[in-house]
Amino acid sequence: MFKGKLIFSQLTDHLPLHIFRRCVARYNGDHYVKTFRCLDQYLIMFFAQLTFRESLRDIEACLRAQQNKLYHMGIRSTISRSTLSDANEERDWHIYAEFAQELICIARPLYADTDLGLELDNTIYALDSSTIDLCLSVFPWALFRSTKSAVKLHTLLDLRGNIPSFIHISDGKMHDVKILDIIIPEAGAFYIMDRAYVDFKRLYSLHLAGAFFVTRTKSNTKYKRRYSNPCDKAIGIMCDQIVVLTGVRSAKEYLQPLRRIRYYDETTKRTLEFFTNNFNTPAKTIADLYRNRWQVELFFKWIKQNLRIKTFFGTTENAVKTQIWIAISVYVLIAIVKKRLQIPCEIYTMLQILSLTLFERMPIDQALNITHYKNDDQGVDNQLNLFSY
């Protein structure tokens, strides 16, 4: 019988706790704290995310039922929903945001060699945002519209491994395009965006930084064709042109030529038009790059369905951001464990298994490696036949 650590402890062994303590010290998270440390808060919220707890009372009841195992999980304090609620409201959310970013820095190199099916060595990012609706009377600080509140999750997703490399949490009123003022461009990387990010002044800043962008065109964009490249209509490329902007504002904001590609998608029966500042990559590859942008949409759908970021354990801005950042760190840590232990199943399956086995004492790789059960019984039955005559 396996007498080692709980699966929860084996999972948290992959957390760089020295970095966590550094983040806590930077923001004085444990200042004047006697019992309920930031690490206790983080581990409890970590448990809540993995087991899909729905309320503070739910968390308290589940952990108190396993009181004799809390020490082995790394939790040194008594579980109280009021103490946890106060910690979520008062402990600086930047602690968990910075720690999640450190986990992202660990995870991204593990997935750097992921094959996207594109003949590109560049880093490829998909940029998008997702809105989490909130009740106006409960979350008045997150104003969105006159009848409701919301927070917006701006995410820059590294498509090699679907690891978020940058996340910004704002209220619902912040326009998507303003996130381009915050992101630090990476030279040589591709940024894939939809039409919400078409702002030629900001796109020109990306161009000056040496980054490439691919974005959909707006119907009212004015431009003039300068040159047409040969195109292969058999693979869906309807046109490949070099254009210059002729709009009153756009011509002043973007001073260089752009590449316009018109592509017919046979799968969806749609015609798409793209603008890019990359003139060397084949047009079909540019179209395939934009198709991969859908991964960020799937990422938002996945975390909303499988992590607790739609219902919150607190109502203050600090509590909401703390919960979101801890949820992101859970996702990234599971991705790290999957790569380090070479787990064949998907992250979704790993979360489902972990939600039921956190208190078990068995090797974590054994719990997560799904194999088909094979019965080796050859029909030998040592039990007496009760119905023999």
Image (cartoon, rainbow, N blue to C red):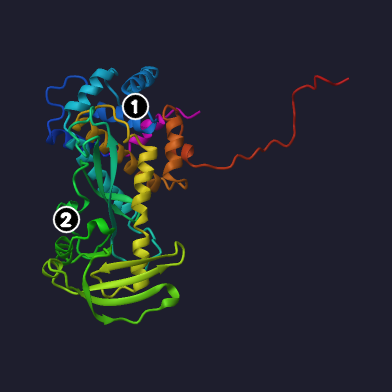
Camera-side residue of 107 and 269: 269
Q: What x and y, as percent, mark residue 373? A: 60, 39
Q: What x and y, as percent, mark residue 156? A: 26, 52
Q: Amino acid at mark 1?
A: Met
- Residue drawn at x 25%, y 56% is 196
Residue 14 on the magenta segment: yes
Q: What x and y, as percent, mark residue 75? A: 29, 24
Can you tell which quarter of the image residue 237 is in? bottom left
Cα distance in 3D space between marks 2 and 1: 38 Å
| Residue 73 disc label | 1
- Sequence order check, earlier mark of 2 and 1: 1
Can you tell which quarter of the image residue 24 is in? top left
Q: Amino acid at mark 2?
A: Ile
Secondary-structure class at tag 1: helix
Q: Is residue 36 above or below residue 240?
A: above
Secondary-structure class at tag 2: loop
Mark 2 lies on residue = 184
Look at the image and give the residue range highlighted in magenta: 1-15
